[in-house]
Amino acid sequence: MTNKIGMISLGCPKNQVDGELILEKLNKSGFEISSILEDSDLIIINTCGFTEDAKKEAIEAILETAEYKKTGIIKAIVVTGCLAQRYKDEIITEIPEVDAVIGIGADRDIVKVCQKALHGITTSFFPDRKYLLLEGERLLSTPSHWAYLKLSDGCNNRCSYCAIPLIRGSYTERPIENIVAEANALAKKGIKELILVAQDTTNYGKSIYGEYKLPQLLNELAEIDGIEWIRLYYCYPDKITNELIDIITSQEKICSYIDIPLQHCNSDILHSMNRKGSYSQLKELIEKMRNRIPDLSLRTTFMVGFPGESEKQFEELCRFVKEMKFDKMGCFAFSPEEDTPAFDYPNQIDDDVKRSRADMLMDIQYAVTQSINKQKLGKIYKTIIDEKSDGGYIGRAYFDSPEIDSNIVFTSDNDLNVGEFADVKITGVDGYDLIGEIV
């Protein structure tokens, strides 16, 4: 009888791609992949360990899965991903129901690890991170019309608050030809939208070629038949070159959408974060991008409550958000991570103050979003259909990314298929979402 394996994948899209590589190796080896956890013999928990909230979510998932094992619903548990890499010994010691804890470099050995776990053999295996599976065949966990495309792993930026280099190691990347070959294979499977991910997408090319190669890569991806949208995540502001802006402007398939995590706008806070920029420099970059890329949609992320952040510096950030009018914005409170420089910084901010600042900044952004959405009323947008809903459809225009951004909810007299594109006229606003009708 074939053993069934389920997966809980947490955290960022990069981690999700790791999970898809794992699932395909298991699938090819003869395991049956189950989408129903309770119907599985073994559950893999692909964890995130980036922030305190992410760690709590991962631990809760492990504990909930441990209850499945205690009650006999499943036979075995394997934990991998960033939390496993960072807390090697604590998981097995403190949660004895876990059968295997493996580092990210052990993912290529996942078949043997699962076989041992199903036979009651406990495994703790942490080979060098250089053995991380950076590419290969994937069992996609995204819908059939869009997929993530991972360019690299690890990071050399060394932001003072970030544990990613400690967990994932130094920056390493894939050759252009390998990425393009994978994109071609995805297009042949029916993928129409590619979302490019890396810890720092704009750094692509520096490791292998000694220079930024993202523009060249984008040009080659735009030539692939079947791919209609290419979307950029995780672009660092100091590496957004004029060449990159020109490519986004000239290539129709590249969405006028950039995810650019800024983290703050105050120069002293950014310097303390080991990041570059200031209010005026970031404003100048954003204005240049908006002037040169028609109808640009900008997504960003900010961190509040960084050690030493004064009320005045936070007010500066609030003013920046009001002035820049980002299309999409996320905000999270500083989380002191062990072994990072910022963990020991003086003037740590009280948790209640951090939460209050995060809520305040999101309230400002909500008002900005409402204003931007109202400006879309009466306009027609090319919309990709993500799912059918009761009496209608849920989709997105170029300015919305799947799973993290908003939706367009619309109706049609014709029967439409998921993954198709349709022209939709915006007729209303519902919170962050838009309401429309097909034209």
Image: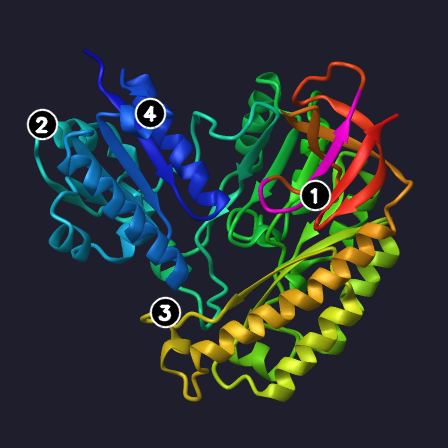
Image location (x, y in percent) of residue 149: 55, 36
Q: Counting residues from the N terminus, which is met first, the one under dot 1 or under dot 3? A: 3
Query: What residue is shown with label 3?
Result: 337
Closer to viewer: mark 3 or mark 4: 3
Q: Amino acid at mark 3?
A: Glu
- Decide which of 159, 372 is in the foreground and name it: 372
- Give the extent of the magenta segment: 403-412
Q: How many other residues sit within 10 Å of disc 4, few (<14), some (14-19) or many (≥20)?
A: many
Query: CA separation, marks 3 and 4?
Result: 33 Å
Q: Identify the mark at residue 400; answer none if there is no mark.
A: 1
Which residue appears at 58% of the width and 48% of the height?
205
Q: Label 2: how many residues lie within 10 Å, few (<14), some (14-19) or many (20+)?
A: few
Tell me the amino acid under the disc marked 1: Asp
Side of 334 where 392 appears, left or right = right
- Of helix, strand and loop, which one carries label 2? loop
Q: Which residue is mark 4?
A: 25
Q: Residue furthest front?
A: 391
Q: Is residue 285 magenta?
A: no
Q: CA distance from mark 1 to mark 4?
A: 32 Å
Question: Which disc is residue 163 wearing?
Answer: none
List the residue tagged with mark 2. 119
Q: Amino acid at mark 4?
A: Lys
Q: How busy is the neighbourhood of tag 1: few (under 14 within 10 Å), some, or many (20 plus)?
A: many
Of labels 1 and 3, the one closer to you: 1
- The location of residue 116, given as percent across then percent down, is 13, 30
Distance from disc 2 to disc 1, alpha carbons, whole Å, reads 46 Å
The residue sitting at 14% across, 39% down in the picture is 99
Q: Amino acid at mark 2?
A: His
Sequence-wise, the earlier of marks 2 and 1 is 2
